[in-house]
Amino acid sequence: EAGRDGDGSVLLRSPSGATARVSLHGGQVVSWKNDRGDELLFTSSKAIMKPPKAMRGGIPICFPQFGNCGTLERHGFARNRMWGLDEEHPALSRSDSGSRSFVDLILKPSEEDTKSWPHSFEFRLRISLTKDGDLSLVSRIRNVNGKPFSFSFAYHTYLSVSDISEVRIEGLETLDYLDNLSQRERHTEQGDAITFESEVDRVYVSSPNVIAVLDHEKKRTFVIRKDGLPDTVVWNPWEKKAKTMADFGDEEYKQTLCVDAAAAERPITLRPGEEWTGRLELSAVPSTNCSDH
Ligand code: BG6
């Protein structure tokens, strides 16, 4: 099959030299590097790369359920399944130089999935690198069922950071959030920007479509653009929880921050034949000293 490496992953390359690797297991982006070869997504040194579970790192897809609020396994089954290549015209995804800059994947429910979640859907996922090396994920989910269904969703994005205590998020200040550490209690964010000194597990509801994650030490800013996804989830397990996770190093909480574009608070409902689109675009830009304050 065109573009498919022996290990069931696909390598994308932008004209600028940025790369991304996409695993068919989970439809998961497992690496995204800039044109200098710096890895921008976190992967745990203890990650288990083999099915049936999602690998700890990159961008697992949470569908049809985000978190534990529902009857399914945490974060749904999509991240644990083998996805197919959805390519009518594989040549189209190749640039002049022969390397590909996007891949189209598809997931349909298995018999087992329909037992736990009795709905028919087609989930098409396009993962691409722009010419400047930005990473784009576009999910299109169609109801091919005879009756409506509802789902929640997240791009569970493990950003790679230098040191969590040097990182801050801008764009979520003054928003309401649901705190997963206290039975989803609703609070209002008081700080000017979000910084980290302990475990955080929050759903910021109705968040703006552009959010910045500033890594002071690396002088890098991640710009997260989303569309169709009202919420933003922020998660860092910190020290104690890190120690309870088998596929995560005890100290690795310092090197990552999950910032997920999500539809978590209110489920999305699709009537028969309807389609929903949710987009994520990530860029990593060098930050200037002006952002010091
Ligand atoms: C976060 C949840 O999104 O994902 C956390 O809010 C959870 O509660 C984390 O621990 C990781 O989940 P998992 O299933 O990948 O270990």
Image: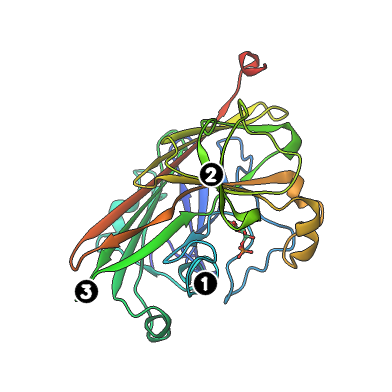
Which of the 4 quarters of the picture holds residue 87?
bottom left
Q: Is residue 42 visible?
A: yes
Q: Residues within 10 Å of mark 1 (few under 14, many from 20)?
A: many
- Precedes in sequence: disc 1 or disc 2: 1
Quadrant holding ligand 1?
bottom right
The answer to whether residue 219 is above or below residue 45 is: above
The answer to whether 92 appears left or right of 132 in the picture is left
Mark 3 in CB contact with mark 2 (< 8 angstroms): no
**Residue at x-position 25% and y-position 62%:** 270
Q: Nearer the viewer, residue 219 or 212?
A: 212
Of labels 1 and 2, the one closer to you: 2
Label 1 and label 3: CA atoms lie apart by 25 Å
Q: CA distance from mark 1 to mark 2?
A: 28 Å
Question: Is 214 above or below relative to 46?
Answer: above
For residue 80, the mark is: 1
- Give me the disc on residue 147: 3
1 or 3: mark nearer the eye: 3
> SS of the residue at dot 1?
helix
Above or below, 172 relative to 31: above
Q: Is disc 3 surrounded by few (<14), some (14 to 19) or many (20+) residues within 10 Å? A: few
Residue flagged by tag 1: what amino acid is it? Asn
* Residue type, label 3: Lys
Q: CA distance from mark 3 to mark 2?
A: 32 Å
Front one among 232 and 219: 232
In the rendered image, residue 172, in percent from the top left (x then y), is placed at: 53, 34
Residue type (three-letter) at the residue carrying disc 2: Tyr
Q: Quick check: 230 above or below 242? A: above
Q: Is tag 3's residue or tag 2's residue first in the polypeptide sequence?
A: 3
Residue 157 image offset from top left, x and y in percent: 55, 50
Residue 177, numbered label: 2
